[in-house]
Image (cartoon, rainbow, N blue to C red):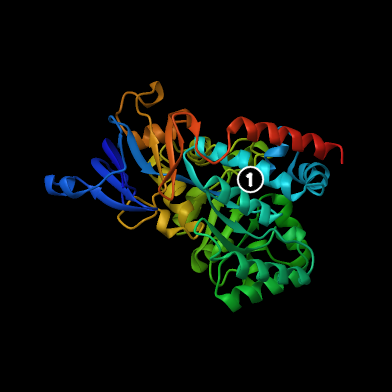
Amino acid sequence: MIRFKNGRVLTLDGSCEVENKEVWVEGDKIAFVGKPTDEQLKTAVFEREIDLEGDLLMPALKNAHTHSAMTFLRSYADDLPLQDWLFTQVFPMEAKLTGEDVYWFTRLAILEYLTSGVSASYDMYFKLDDYIKANIDSGFRTVMCDAVSDGKERAAVVEERYLRYNGMHPLISFRLGFHAEYTAQYGLLEAIGELAKKYKAPVSTHNSETAKEVADCIKKYGKTPTALFDSLGIYDYGGAGFHCVYLSEEDMDIFAEKGVYAVSCPCSNAKLASGIAPITRLIEKGVKLGLGTDGPASNNALDMFREMYLLTVLQKLRNSDAAALPADEVLSIACSGSARAMGLENCDCIAVGKQADLTVIDLNKPSMQPIHNIPKNLVYSGSKENVKLTMVAGKVLYEGGKFFVGEDDRTIYAKCAEHFEALKNR
């Protein structure tokens, strides 16, 4: 067992209260939370004892929407609106990618996740065998949803992957999905709805990211993307909508009724000038929320601390209300809400039997002092510099600035540079 002792613990198991407790990890699960008795300490066998020295142990953050391998396009095509950025810059470069490219660019993203206290990503990309290998080789947890587009025949690919990838490895899971309404033909949308019904499974996709996307969908189908998906049964078993900047009141009602998570990506939406999602209104409507970075080509960071800060301050600005979306809610969204949006209910808090996806926050940093309110410090002044350790499934993958992912970080950087040069010349 691994013992975390002499520290503060934020369990997020129903509240944001910080307590002086111990947490013990056995294998990939949390085995004990609380103050041990002398008898318990006498009989326990620890392979390692981590003295927190007053630092904070908390559930790891979860990145509920990203495109990890897009690290290769970081700062490559900036300062462009979404449609131009996507269709003239991103898609042409992605068409040249090989599986080996995706492998190394994903491994780079994983390093960045770990330094941000992130233990799992909800990824939408392609070359999935190579993507999966990168995560398994690194010991990182990922949930994938499909990114298919075009016609009805592509639904067979989604079904085949759904059956093949689920259950293949404890760190890997796969959910039904497609890229977006604007890249899918109507036949594909119908077929995805049928898959949702067949497997009683949630579906995830980009939804209402821009005003143009929504206006074009209404022009084409007479419905918003959300209403269209609902009419086809796509959301009958829940799922997730990524971005959700331009949801109507009726759209929000559908999300609440069907249990669909709205996953916000405030940094990407701001950088692409897409808009500010109506988070406080979504909460009022009873919509469940998650938080993600989007890909490193549109963000350009994979830093969940930055997302938490932007999520709250943009809502204060949008509502002209400094009390809007307080820090406790944001922290819960980033850890617990995001985990549930990904189907990782076993990773949503610190409790006995849950997966040991944990992070240690260094409180002895200027940004964390004085310690008036730790959750508020994390959201309003915290950053990835405060992340001391990240554990995934009971294994320490990042600690004290060093990575334990089966490959030297400098080797990963060099491989990524090599693959990008080759990519440019194809």
Q: Is residue 380 above or below residue 101?
A: above
Query: Which residue is more in the foreground, 325 or 105?
Result: 105
Q: In this rendering, would 103 be left or right of 424?
A: left
At a point 45% along the width and 55% down the height, the residue shown is: 284
The answer to whether residue 274 of the structure is visible from this angle is no
Q: Is residue 5 above or below residue 220?
A: above
- Return the residue at label 1: 68
* Position in image of residue 176 (x %, y %): 62, 65
Q: In this rendering, would 235 be left or right of 84?
A: left
Check disc 1 and give the amino acid type: Ser
**Residue at the far right in the pictured view:** 426
Q: In this rendering, would 287 be left or right of 174?
A: left
Task: Using a 10 Å C-alpha cutoff, classify the residue at mark 1 as few (fewer than 14 neighbours), some (14 to 19) or many (20 or more).
Answer: many
Q: Quadrant of residue 423?
A: top right
Q: In this rendering, would 62 be left or right of 76?
A: left
Q: Secondary structure at mark 1?
A: helix
Query: Which residue is more in the foreground, 277 or 7?
Result: 7
**Residue at the far left in the pictured view:** 38
Q: Quadrant of residue 247?
A: bottom right
* Position in image of residue 262 (x %, y %): 54, 55
* Position in image of residue 421 (x %, y %): 80, 34
At a point 75% along the width and 61% down the height, the residue shown is: 149
At a point 36% along the width and 37% down the height, the residue shown is: 375
At a point 66% along the width and 60% down the height, the residue shown is: 146
